[in-house]
Amino acid sequence: MSDLFPTYAKFPIEIVEGKGTIVKDSNGKEYLDFTSGIAVCNLGHCHETVLAAAQKQLGQIWHTSNLFESSIQEQVATKLTAGEERVVFFCNSGAEANEAALKLAKKHTGCDEIITFKQSFHGRTIATMTATGQSKIHDGFGALLPGFTYLPYNDLEALEKTISAQTAAVMLEVIQGEGGVLLATKEFLIGASNLCQKYGALLIIDEVQTGMGRTGTRFAFEQVGIKPDIFTLAKGLGNGLPVGAMIGKAELAATFGPGSHGSTFGGNKIAMVAADAVIDIIFDEAFLEDVTEKGAYFQQLLTEKLAANVVAIRGAGLMLGIELDMEAKDVVSALQELGLLTLTAGPNVLRIVPPLTVTKQELEQAANWIESVLIKQEVGMK
Ligand SMILES: *Cc1c(COP(=O)(O)O)cnc(C)c1O
């Protein structure tokens, strides 16, 4: 029996080594990792530049509290805000980044009402789990945080009817990752941004999964041209070293004065040097164009091979979902047998989030395996 809380239903595979897109399990079997550890290792496993930066820092100093100056925090914040009037709070995870965003919105506006969307996912702390619009995540935990309303995603009319001067924030994902790789429409995002401005509510965009180049731009909201009041990052930011960030407009800075919020480990130097190296690689036009191009190529390959046999293929950049008319977890297992690691998103969606450094050859190999499982009916024909 395991000595762990069984919070995760685990695959019977232990990954012990990785380089780029390729990982090896404890039996020596190799896989193409199209999970990137749930969209975390966006530069592939053990990326050399990130590794060298972390190793160098490990030999210098690991931890100083946030009571002391940190030039590496300042440097990463400057790169993340990239010339815009924004300020950054560093933490260690996506939930913590969203928790900080919710606290900031409540304190800044003096309001308690927060609007989020059905099928969303924002984390597992009490506040971020309350923000998550999925009853399966709420069930059994008793009273949630008050003030939250869940609206249908992409329903601008519902938002217009609900938002008011009492709304502290509207919180959303540009692509709902855990919810099923569901894309917001441009009209919805622009409309939500306009409504927030009209009522003085803060627009919080959760870029924990979609950020850091995953969809072909630094942050997914950039493709729509909106400017959220707050956005959050985590998964891809440290390429596997734990780090999160909450980025807000500069006018919010005074609301989070000394004593208002904090984190012991947030912005620690090991995570910061990793994030610094990750940003230098990903926030590069040619790198991001390559992500867009490979994503379009992969989506086209999958569409050619599968379109007639699946419900839908959708996504942006290298964040793709294939909606099936069967349980996606059976497909995940069959692909593991062949040597391809993938994820689910909800019961029927196969989620594919390879490292952004994936090669075209690896994309072709993966597309062939997915075709062989889905079309040649190795799965689902009981
Ligand atoms: C993963 C995820 C989170 C939670 O991040 P943790 O690091 O697990 O706390 C929040 N929001 C979105 C959109 C995510 O994908």
Image (tube, helix red, strand yellow):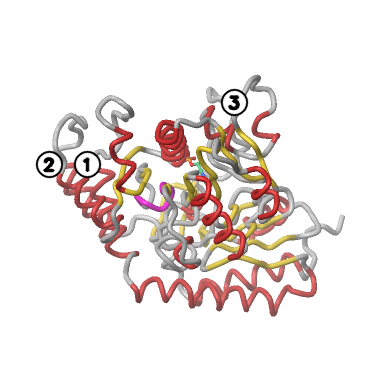
| Magenta-span inclusion, residue 13 | no
Cα distance, mark 3 to mark 1? 36 Å
Q: Earlier along the polypeptide chain: callout 3 or callout 2?
A: 2
- Residue 225, image x and y in percent? 46, 66
**Secondary structure at numbered mark 3:** loop
Q: Are marks 3 and 1 in contact (CB under 8 Å)?
A: no
Residue at 74% over, 53% down: 348
**Secondary structure at numbered mark 1:** helix
- Residue 152, image x and y in percent? 70, 48
Q: Nearer the viewer, residue 221 or 4?
A: 221
Give residue 146's mark.
3
Magenta part of the chain: 233-238
Give residue 281's mark.
none
- Residue 116, image x and y in percent? 60, 42
Cα distance, mark 3 to mark 2? 45 Å
- How many marks the image carries: the answer is 3
Q: Is residue 246 left or right of residue 51?
A: right
Amino acid type of disc 1?
Lys
Place residue 302 in its image quadrant: bottom right
Residue at far right of view: 382
Q: Nearer the viewer, mark 3 or mark 2?
A: 3
Q: Earlier along the polypeptide chain: callout 3 or callout 1?
A: 3
| Mark 1 CB near ligand 1 (8 Å cut) | no
| Mark 3 CB near ligand 1 (8 Å cut) | no
Q: Earlier along the polypeptide chain: callout 1 or callout 2?
A: 2
Q: Which residue is mark 2?
A: 60
Residue at 29% over, 40% down: 253
Cα distance, mark 1 to mark 2? 10 Å
